[in-house]
Image (tube, rainbow, N blue to C red):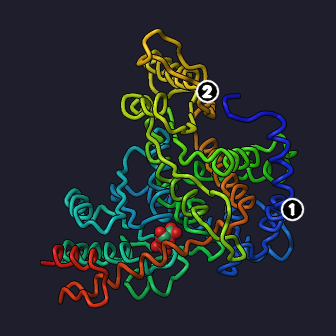
Amino acid sequence: SKSHIDDTVWQLLLELAESRQASALRDAMFAGAATNTSEQRQVMHWLLRKPDTADLPPHLLPAWQEMDATRRRFLDFAEAIRANPDITDIVNIGIGGSDLGPCMAVQALQAHAHTGKRFHFISNIDGHVLQQTLQQLNARNTLFIVSSKSFSTLETMHNARAALEWFRQQTAHTSADVAAHFVGITTNTAAAASLGVHTTFGFWDWVGGRYSLWSAIGLPLAIAIGAQGFEQLLAGAHAVDRHFVQAAPDKNLPLLLGLLQVWESSLLRYTSRCMAPYLSSLQRLPAYLQQLEMESNGKSMTRYGQAVHWHTTPALWGEPGTNSQHAFFQQIRQGTHITPVEFIAVRQARHPWHQHHVLLLANALAQAQALMQGYDHANPHQRIAGNRPSTFFVLPELTPRTLGALLAVYEHRTFVSGAVWDINSFDQWGVEQGKVMALDIASRWQNADTTGLDASTAHLLRKLCQ
Ligand code: F6P
């Protein structure tokens, strides 16, 4: 009701989705076709949340069985850690999809979490984070989870090696051993073993990093909320998978949201979208969605390798309300750029201060109202033009199930936008190239070797490595 859209545009967008074969692509994804064409991989994160084999194409049965056995194993492991009072600290070492999902979800569901455990997330190659975290830990009470789909990511490998060294030093004269305190989550179990991590939980190349929360990458969350809680998260996402496949186009939430994104980005040319969750525990949701949407759809080539002639995904950013109101809402209300805002409100709070929650929700609603209606005033400085778009999500409460559903809606809307933009949402070649260039610069460090570098980079290299 608060978007710059009318029935005619909706109708045209639904026709556009059909002409781009969005539903055929969706069906191909759910049939296990290699829809990640540039890497020739299946796209089957949805399989991770499938509770049983109902309606499963027979050729996907072996993949489901292997996945289900791994799921049982890591959920049993999570329960064992929950029941072990000697393990008080869980440290996840991983980056990108091997960090953002579990980090965001552990924080989001803290009200449902085991109170006897502390969770830490080390992602950056910035060693300060590693140092500050290790300082708080007792090695014998700590479980390290080294999460990396490839088990070759620079940041994760360096942090894991440093943590292993620290652990060995700390436990040199004790019986504590790496096998009981380090686990690896990866598709590359051989690489984990060569690092000395032999307890591993696998996943598969058909799970993109940014779609991997549902796999063993979710282990920190499973430890926090327990196997049953994790299964609820999966159930919420699975319900959305079914909705996405079955619901009529004009009632299909991911389809409509994906099309709205296309309309706002490609046709109206809005260059960013703001996330405003009105719940502090969703603090990391914008960062999680940045990877999901911007790594998936921040592209300018079609899936066939031709340049696109339309704008694809906009910048995504945000911060929980009401803090955001006291920081950047001024620009959203009166600035020259139009930024669609996405409000997320959770009806039921889990704290005893009713009036706090009333005020929180009232503020969310009022912001959306003000953006749409504006405010007339004799003083031009106080005038707000209004007619600024927003979308409003209402969750009954934040539970594993509703969080799972919400995240799956975001995944599928990203898929829909990508399909209409005609791009492959499941590769990330731009990021891969950045990794190669960073290694090249690192190799020049010791001798300040600027051979062949542009003048700006050469000057900065000399300054930094002095
Ligand atoms: O940032 C690029 C990326 O490849 C992401 O897609 C991925 O989630 C992240 O690096 C971490 O990769 P890995 O899990 O292999 O360590």
Q: CA distance from mark 2 to mark 1?
A: 45 Å
The correct choice, above or below, for 371 with respect to 25 in the image is: above
The quadrant in which the C terminus is found is: bottom left
- What is the x, y in percent for residue 128? 22, 62
- What is the x, y in percent for residue 5? 73, 35
Q: Which sits in the foreground, 463 or 431?
A: 463
Determine whether the beta carbon of the residue marked 2 sits less than 8 angstroms from the nearest atom of ligand 1.
Answer: no
Mark 2 or 1, nearer chain start = 1
- What is the x, y in percent for residue 92? 39, 63
- What is the x, y in percent for residue 465? 16, 78
Q: The residue under label 2 is which amino acid type?
A: Asn
Residue shown at the point (48%, 11%) measured from the top left:
377
Mark 2 in CB contact with mark 1 (< 8 angstroms): no
The correct choice, above or below, for 133 with respect to 263 in the image is: below
- The image quadrant of residue 400 is top right
Residue shown at the point (47%, 78%) measured from the top left:
433
Mark sitting on residue 55: 1
The correct choice, above or below, for 289 with respect to 70 in the image is: above
The correct choice, above or below, for 283 with respect to 321 in the image is: below
The quadrant in which the N terminus is found is: top right
Mark sitting on residue 387: 2
In the shown orientation, is residue 313 left or right of residue 9? left
Q: The residue under label 1 is which amino acid type?
A: Asp
Q: Secondary structure at mark 2?
A: loop
In the shown orientation, is residue 167 left or right of residue 185? left
Q: Secondary structure at mark 1?
A: loop
Q: Can residue 235 be seen in this snapshot?
A: no
Q: Can residue 192 be seen in this snapshot?
A: yes
- For label 2, the crowd category at 10 Å Cα-Cα, with few meaning under 14, some 14 to 19 and many 20 or more, is some
